């Protein structure tokens, strides 16, 4: 597999949560192509195994850890197993996330609690478990939390999602401040509108297309590969002096 000199990650061990689809699956492929051994974490075992097989067939290394990130005992068990079988992580892509679209006045308790559990609490736990192992091993590392432009600029019908992504941005700063002394960097990527299986129908609709042209100065959604440069910068030693940053990749959405 290709290992370009911009970000050669050969020999590195990376965990990607929410790896069964969308951005998580894409990030896993990108890291594997740069030489990482990638540990794939999500709830859907069959989808994870299909991705692991794809990466392996392409010459990379990937292993499946079927885990619900909101189940703390299961998450801790997976981290123990990852360490035993593969060693201490170098890179974490804290990507697992969900959204329940609903007006604020109509949002159910169950849906809201689920969004907070996945997008906020689980992000905290994954980062904490990874950083604990890195710190105890005296190993430098990089944690990359996946935030969103909606963490800075809200949208109607997505109050719980936007709130949790704002929390991710603030958590990133707090984590980075405390982990810098251990040479563990913590940053975030804030994607704008990218097409995944979750939002595909909306973004392809007339309403979605009109919103993009109205709200995004570049007048289009992102291609998934347009996130690769930032991912590799933050994952590699090319970004060795960057910590506590949230980098938007949004076609100008936040300045529009």
Image (cartoon, grey):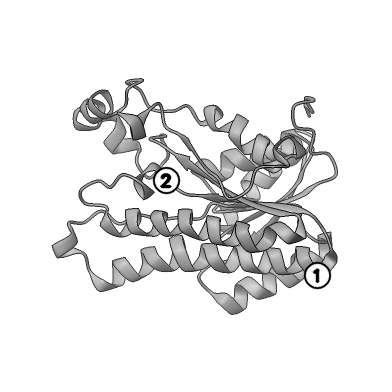
Mark 2 and mark 1: span between their CA atoms?
A: 31 Å
Q: Position of residue 224 (x, y in %)?
A: 51, 31
Query: Which residue is the extreme one toward the bottom?
Result: 73
Residue at 78%, 29% (x, y): give it: 1
Which residue is at a point 21% across and 51% down the rendered structure image?
157
> In the drawing, does residue 252 fall left or right of residue 141?
left
Residue 148 bears which disc, if any?
2
Single out the residue that lies furthest toward the top: 218
How many numbered discs?
2
The residue labelled by disc 1 is 136
**Rendered location of residue 61, percent (x, y):** 78, 44
Question: Quadrant where the C terminus lies?
Answer: top left
Asked whether disc 2 touches disc 1, contact meaning CB atoms under 8 Å apart, the reply is: no
Furthest-left residue in this view: 105
Q: Secondary structure at mark 2?
A: loop
Q: Residues within 10 Å of mark 1 (few under 14, many from 20)?
A: few
Q: Is residue 21 visible?
A: yes
Q: Is residue 92 visible?
A: no
Q: Which mark is residue 195?
A: none
Q: Earlier in the sequence, mark 2 or mark 1?
A: 1
Q: Secondary structure at mark 1?
A: helix
Count residues near mark 2 (Cα–Cα under 10 Å), then give few for <14, some for 14-19, many for 20+: many
Residue 84 drawn above or below residue 248: below
Residue 116 found in image quarter: bottom left
Q: Residue at x 55, y 61 (%)?
A: 174
Q: Nearer the viewer, residue 247 or 161?
A: 247
Residue at image point 85% right, 44% down: 11
5 relative to 80, above or below: above
Residue 50 pos. (x, y %): 63, 46
């Amino acid at each position: 597999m290709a290992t370009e000199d911009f970000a050669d990650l050969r020999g590195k061990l990376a965990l990607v949560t929410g790896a069964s689809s969308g951005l998580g699956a894409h990030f896993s492929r990108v890291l594997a192509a740069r030489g990482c051994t990638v540990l794939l974490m999500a709830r859907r075992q069959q989808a994870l195994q299909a991705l692991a097989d794809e990466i392996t067939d392409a010459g990379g290394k990937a292993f499946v850890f079927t885990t619900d990130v909101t189940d703390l005992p299961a998450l801790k068990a997976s981290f123990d197993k990852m360490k035993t079988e593969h060693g201490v992580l170098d890179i974490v892509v804290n990507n697992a996330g969900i959204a329940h679209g609903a007006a604020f006045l109509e949002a159910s308790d169950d849906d809201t609690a689920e969004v907070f559990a996945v997008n906020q609490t689980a992000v905290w736990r994954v980062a904490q478990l990874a950083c604990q192992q890195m710190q105890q091993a005296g190993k430098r590392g990089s944690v990359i939390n996946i935030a969103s432009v909606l963490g800075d600029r809200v949208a109607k019908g997505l109050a719980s999602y936007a709130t949790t992504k704002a929390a991710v941005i603030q958590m990133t700063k707090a984590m980075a401040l405390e982990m810098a002394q251990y040479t563990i960097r913590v940053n975030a990527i804030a994607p704008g509108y990218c097409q995944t299986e979750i939002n595909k129908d909306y973004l392809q609709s007339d309403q979605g297309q009109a919103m993009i042209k109205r709200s995004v100065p570049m007048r289009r959604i992102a291609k998934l590969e347009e996130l690769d440069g930032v991912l590799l910068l933050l994952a590699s030693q090319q970004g060795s002096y960057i910590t506590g940053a949230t980098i938007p990749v949004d076609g100008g959405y936040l300045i529009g």
